[in-house]
Image (spheres, rainbow, N blue to C red):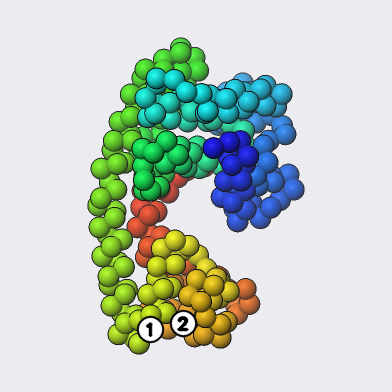
Amino acid sequence: MSLRLIRGIHGLLMQQVRGGSLHLPPGEFRGMQNRIGGTSRANARLVPPTVDAMHDALGAFERYLHEEDTTPPLIRCGLLHYQIETIHPFNDGNGRVGRLLITLYLVWKGILDEPMLYLSAYPKTHQQEYYDRLTQVRTDGNFEAWIRFFLERIREVSRMVPQTTKRIQALERKDSDRLVAQGEGSHGLALLRGLMRQPVVTANDVARIVGVGYTKANSLISVCENLGIPRQMSPGRRNRKFMYNDYVGILREGTELSPAVD
């Protein structure tokens, strides 16, 4: 867990969103002042630190990330999330990185065995209170209200995990049966397991995941596409990408975030 990792996460998350534009390079901390909301700094919801102050704050953030004390890990996690959202080190994508950081931190600290806590939904359903609580820390030092809100959302999302897991398992059983019925048991099941780790693939990805040649990978994609398992994401025959839409749809439910939470 480090600033280098956080930059790497941002680079992966934002690469397709930004297309790697020069003024918004994925994986790089911002080089200019930014703001959240409003039409100017005067009426913005948040004006993050200047670039120089941001780098100092990020250094303090990284030190706190590795400090050992008696604070319970979930509370430390809430404080770290508050810090990264307030520092706002990227021009966009800060919310995505901050939410993913929660899950990775809990895995790192051994609270979770697997990154199964999917936190993208909670700012959407409690967006106004989320910002209000963060603002209260900045203006009044009211950490208690923020931590209480944070822990309640962690509990709420945790209760969703078993239901989501059961739906994913049911989808896996259904699509496994369909692939076996099409005579693609061995290769089809290998691809299905791969799609649950990497739900967007190319033909080369399929060849690597399944351990077959490019021609067989395309044939397997065709069989699976006819079943509606992966679907082509864009028109054309070159550089095609396919997404396991039903699987991604389960994970996306409740996560249609407005730009303010991004």
Q: Residue at x 71, y 24 (%)?
A: 52
Q: Secondary structure at mark 2?
A: helix
Q: Quadrant of residue 230?
A: bottom left
Up-down: is 2 above or below 171?
Answer: above
Q: Quadrant of residue 181?
A: bottom left
Mark 1 is surrounded, within 10 Å at the Cα level, by few (under 14), some (14 to 19) or many (20 or more) other residues, namely some
As shown in the figure, which amino acid type bears the numbered disc 1? Glu
| Closer to us: 63 or 222 | 63
**Can residue 127 be seen in the rendering of this structure?**
yes
Up-down: is 16 above or below 232?
Answer: above
**Pointer 2 and pointer 1: residues touching (CB < 8 Å)?**
yes
Where residue 245 sits: x, y (%)? 41, 65
Where residue 139 sits: x, y (%)? 49, 14
Estimate the spatial distance between the alpha carbons at disc 2 and disc 1, rounded to whole Å: 8 Å
Q: Secondary structure at mark 1?
A: loop
Q: Residue at x 33, y 29 (%)?
A: 151
Among the two numbered marks 2 and 1 on one chain, the one whose residue lies closer to the N terminus: 1
| Closer to us: 43 or 226 | 226
**Can residue 94 be seen in the rendering of this structure?**
no
**Label placed on residue 244:** none
Which residue is the site of mark 1?
Answer: 184
Mark 2 is surrounded, within 10 Å at the Cα level, by few (under 14), some (14 to 19) or many (20 or more) other residues, namely many
Where residue 57 sits: x, y (%)? 62, 23
Q: Residue at x 25, y 57 (%)?
A: 166
Q: Residue furthest top?
A: 140
Up-down: is 205 above or below 100?
Answer: below
Relative to 94, 160 lies left or right: left
**Label placed on residue 220:** 2
